Each structure stands twice: as structure tokens, then as C-alpha cells.
Image (tube, helix red, strand yellow):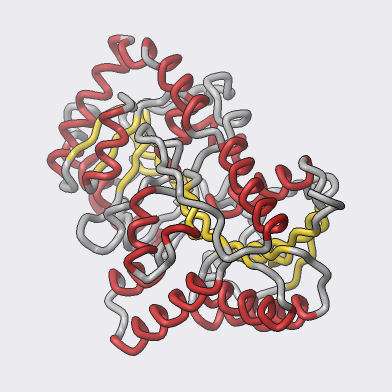
Amino acid sequence: MSGRSRILIASRLFPPEVSAGAFRLGALARSLHERGDGVVVLTTRPPRHAPQTADAPGVVVRRWPVLRDSGGNVRGYIQYLSYDAPLFFRLLFSSFDVAVAESPPTTGLVVTAVAALRRKPVVYYAADVWTDGVISMGAPAPVIAVMRWMERIVLRRAQAIVSVSDEVTERLVALDADRTRIETVGNGIDTSIFTPDAVLPTGVDPYFVYTGTMSEWQRPDLFIRALALITEEEPAARIRFFGQGAVEADLRALAEEIVPGRVEFGGVVSPQESASWIRGATAALVSIVPGIGYDFARPTKTYAAAAVGTPVLFAGPETGARLVRDADLGTSVDFDPESVATAMRELLAEERSGRAAEQRTARAAWARANVSLTAVAERVAAVTSQVRERRTTKIGPARPARSGPDERPFA
């Protein structure tokens, strides 16, 4: 590449905010800087509960306040607009060679429009398919139509599309994305933080841990209902939730009703603290509600658990279940309390016998080899470099993601 490229990243999520999207883009910014590119990030002021950390050296981060819901999330049309409207004007007066736009499609549309005015290329980072998401939430037909329209425009106008899994790639193609512009790079976790060497919590009863987003498409109440089925035989077992989300209040109420004193909510914590709690858990709980449009998801909760060597208890569709089975990362079951309760009993027994500890090293080795977030970021950075060099409408055929996924999400 001749000269130093100027890469602009536009995303409502960026470290120190705690989310899979923030981690993903933070890693990309660092990778671009290490390649010698100039990097500017246009993002939001983090919520009050975000950890206090410095921005990556050499990366220019420009923030502004936005509307957030009661949980501190930028979630909802008005909240998105509070980011997207100022973004439009900042993009107009920012200097860049390539823009990287993250979802939602409203943000992608703003970046696409300004880039077209300024004749600059766009790389769209597609971690999710938002049209599928609004359908799964039962949105009205006009809302679905508008979302599909926006998403299609963004996909058609992007010089390159970065996808996190083969399943997401197929959904993008179904929305009329040009397959030759899609690069399937996978998804991952920071294996320098999520490691078997994470500090173990002390003085705690046996517990299962749930980290990250608590939403309608995960329905983590499933695990509380399962815990209630094993309380008599496993009186010491607990569940610890870390994170937040739209259904957190419902989870708290349910826990108080059916298993009082057995479920704890620790709020949003730093990645280091999250790694510690996962490291000490009997198993990490991961769920996806089947049949609502997210059957293709591979939650990064699975990768975080694997990286520290803790077994996963996954409840949900075949894609996530196959990942757990094929890589021997733990146990996958149907999405019902009875199946989850049976798995909880077995995992507690394995922990007491020492069998779970014997597999810790193998799980962590798999994560380092297959789901390193640094390696994923390097692949995305290579895509942006190719777009900058060629300034063409095609970036070559998509590479299939590895089956033991170097892929995908803290969803």
C-alpha cells in the first residue's frame, strides 16, 4: 500500500463499553494501527457502569452523548437516531480513505450516504442480520419492510462486507448481498484475558455463570427454572448473572419467586472480572431461543468459556449445539428446563469427580487455535487494506469459515 491509510470506524459500541461488538471493534482498531494505518473512531460516550480504561494508543476516539435505555444500552429507534444524526455531520467533515460501518443498518445507511457523497469506499461489518431480528421480535410489517430496505441498500453499496460466520453469510446473500463481496472472517474472544490462568474466586459455593446480554432471544429464565428442579438434591448450587439487558428485571423477580437466595446478579463487570467468574464456574450457561430468527447464532459466551477451559451448557438450536459437540466444549441440550436440569446435575457430578478439570487445557487450546479475536481482527484489517488498494467493487470470493469455528459474540 502506498502511503498511510486513514481508516474511520463508525459504531455506537466501542471499548470500554462491555459487549461483543465493542470488543470486536476495539481489536480491529488496534490491528489497523499496528499495520501502520491512521485510525479514527466515531462512537458514543460509554455508560456510567462501563469500566474505566484508556483508549488504545495511537487510535483517535471521538465520542458524544447519546440516549440510552434504563439498562444503559443504545437500543431502540430513538436511541439509534441520537447516535446516527450527529454521526452524519461528523462524517461530512472527517478525513478518511475507507469507512468501516457497524450495525445497525441505520448507522450503515448514514455511513453509506456520506461515503457516496464523498466517493469513499465502505466496509460493512455484519455481525447480525437485523431484518431477521425485527421479524423475530414480532415487529409490524411496515417496520420489517423498512429494515429490509435499509439493510439491502447498505449491503448493495458496500465495497466489502465482513461476516462473522457461514450462517450469517447465507442470510446476507438471501438479502441480495453479492457473495463475491463477502469475506467470512469468523468471530472470537480475547485469549490474552480469557485464559485458564484467570484468578479464581474464593469462598463461593458451586455456581453456574451467565455473562453478557439478557434479552428476549436468549430467555435465560430457562436456567433459573432448571435450577429450581435440582434445589433439593443440590442445595448449595447457585447461578450468578453478570451483564444486563431487557429481561433482567423479569429474571430477578422469577428468581425471588421460585429459588430465593439462589441467584445473584453482579451487574456489568470488566472482561478480567468476567474471566475470573467464568474460570471458577461449574459451567457457563449459553442459550438461544429456537425458531425466532437467530438459529444461526454462535454466541461469544461459548468462546469465552472455552478460552478459560470451563465447560459450556448450551440450550438452543443446532448451530450452537453443533459447535459445542464438535469441539467437545461441554454439553448441549434442548431448550427446556428439564433437559437443562439434567445437564446441571451431570456437570456438578463431573466437577466433583475432577473430570471437568482434566479437559480444561484442551478446551483452552482449542480456543487459542480457533477463536482468537486478534486473528479475526487481522483478517478484517486485511479486507480494509484490500479495499483501499484496489478501490474496486469486488474483493474476491468469500473464504468459508472453518468448521471448528474460527467464528462467532458477550451476545
Q: Relative to 19, is 174 above or below?
A: below
Q: On the rendered structure, is 389 left or right of 110?
A: right
Q: Quadrant of residue 100?
A: bottom right
Q: Residue at x 38, y 55 (%)?
A: 168
Residue 201 in the image: state x and y as whole percent: 53, 25
Q: Is residue 124 visible?
A: no
The residue at the far left in this view is: 338
Residue 386 in the image: state x and y as whole percent: 66, 52
Residue 58 in the image: state x and y as whole percent: 85, 48
Q: Which residue is drawn at 33% across and 57% down?
A: 170
Q: Which residue is drawn at 48% across and 56% down?
A: 182
Q: Relative to 27, is 215 above or below?
A: below
Q: On the rendered structure, is 135 left or right of 160?
A: left
Q: Can residue 167 be seen in this view?
A: yes
Q: In which quarter of the image is residue 30?
A: top right
Residue 145 in the image: state x and y as whole percent: 35, 85
Picture mark count: 0
Depth check: give the residue in front, 99 or 252: 99
Q: Relative to 324, is 41 above or below?
A: below
